[in-house]
Image (cartoon, grey):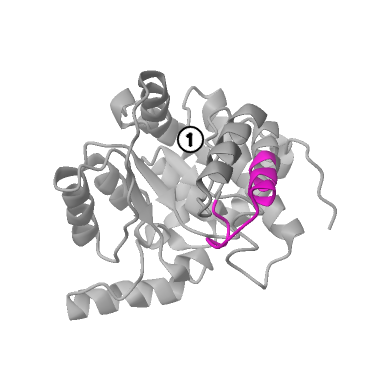
């Protein structure tokens, strides 16, 4: 499989999209034009990229925790608690492990078990299983911007449903969401899958809706050399930009040496 850093043609994208939206039953509810219109109703103070840009301009540090549970009501209550009691500025929806591996039947079983037991039997929020309407209920129930955080090698359907569902930021990339998370996916395949994700985000951009994209800087979450982390961030930024993405946030995971970490962040800012 040969991968090139070139923009997907409309023919390539829409042919692939037919297969993507058929991967799970909630895909049929995704309508691009209607989703663009819905995204345009979301105010700037709930747009992830807008809030980041304003914070940078004002020199303010923002707080974003990690969180996600199986049941819709409990997930909303958790996010509300984080913004009300935890004073979180940016909210997450961490996706469960079954969804990350496109195992939607098992995620569905986890939702059913969670309802039966009254507690979360999944380690995250199963956005694909819930679909567009429930995702919109989640994102509209809180005051702050909400980002999808996951770890999915093939996030194509998750991207479609998340953006249609009102999330204004989507994390990950073809490298950073492969090597740290999966031993069974080739880089060629995951980069191709993420070219689809980024082309979709680029199409929203062209329609007047800016969706924030964040390559996952910490990678394995261990002592990653700064040069490796920054290189992956730059590569994924270039791949995303080629597909039309305009709002890109690069990340970095602290490794314990304050001087090196500060230098890495400053150099990453210059490089991107």
Q: Name the residue at 64% across, 37% down.
A: 237
Is 99 magenta? The answer is: no
Q: Is residue 91 above or below residue 205?
A: below
Horizontal and vertical percent for residue 185? 68, 67
Q: Residue at x 33, y 36 (%)?
A: 62
Q: Position of residue 239 (x, y in %)?
A: 69, 39
Q: Nearer the viewer, residue 22 or 257?
A: 257
| 123 in relation to 239, above or below | below
Residue 167 visible in image: yes
Q: Residues within 10 Å of mark 1 (few under 14, many from 20)?
A: many
Q: Quadrant of the N terminus?
A: bottom right
Q: Is residue 224 magenta?
A: yes
Region rendered in magenta: 218-234
Residue visible at 29% across and 66% down in the picture = 70
Image quadrant in which you'd find residue 190: bottom right
> Which residue is pictured at 71% across the width and 51% down the height?
192
x and y percentages locating residue 218 in the rendered image: 54, 53
**Residue that numbered label 1 is attached to:** 212
Q: Residue furthest left?
A: 85
What is the number of callouts on the image? 1
Quadrant the C terminus occupies: top right
Q: Is residue 161 left or right of residue 119?
A: right
Image position of 92 (left or right of 101):
left
């Amino acid at each position: 499989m040969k991968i090139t850093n070139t923009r997907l043609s409309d023919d390539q994208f829409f042919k692939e999209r037919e297969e993507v939206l058929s991967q799970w039953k909630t895909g049929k509810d995704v309508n691009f034009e209607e989703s663009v219109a819905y995204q345009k109703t979301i105010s700037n103070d709930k747009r992830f990229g807008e809030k980041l840009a304003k914070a940078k301009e004002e020199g303010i540090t923002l707080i974003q925790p990690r969180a996600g549970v199986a049941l819709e009501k409990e997930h909303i209550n958790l996010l509300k608690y984080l913004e009300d009691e935890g004073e979180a500025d940016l909210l997450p929806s961490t996706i469960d492990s079954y969804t990350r591996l496109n195992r939607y039947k098992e995620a569905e079983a986890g939702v059913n078990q969670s309802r039966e037991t009254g507690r979360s039997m999944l380690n995250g929020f199963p956005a694909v299983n819930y679909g567009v309407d429930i995702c919109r209920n989640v994102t509209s129930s809180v005051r702050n911007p909400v980002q999808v955080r996951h770890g999915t090698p093939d996030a194509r359907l998750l991207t479609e449903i998340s953006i249609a569902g009102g999330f204004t930021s989507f994390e990950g990339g073809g490298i950073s969401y492969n090597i740290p998370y999966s031993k069974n996916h080739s880089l060629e395949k995951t980069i191709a899958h993420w070219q689809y994700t980024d082309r979709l985000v680029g199409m929203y951009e062209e329609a007047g809706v800016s969706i924030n994209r964040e390559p996952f800087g910490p990678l394995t979450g261990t002592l990653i050399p700064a040069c490796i982390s920054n290189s992956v961030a730059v590569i994924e930024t270039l791949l995303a930009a080629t597909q039309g993405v305009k709002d890109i946030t690069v990340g970095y995971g602290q490794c314990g040496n304050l001087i090196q970490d500060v230098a890495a962040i400053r150099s990453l800012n210059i490089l991107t």
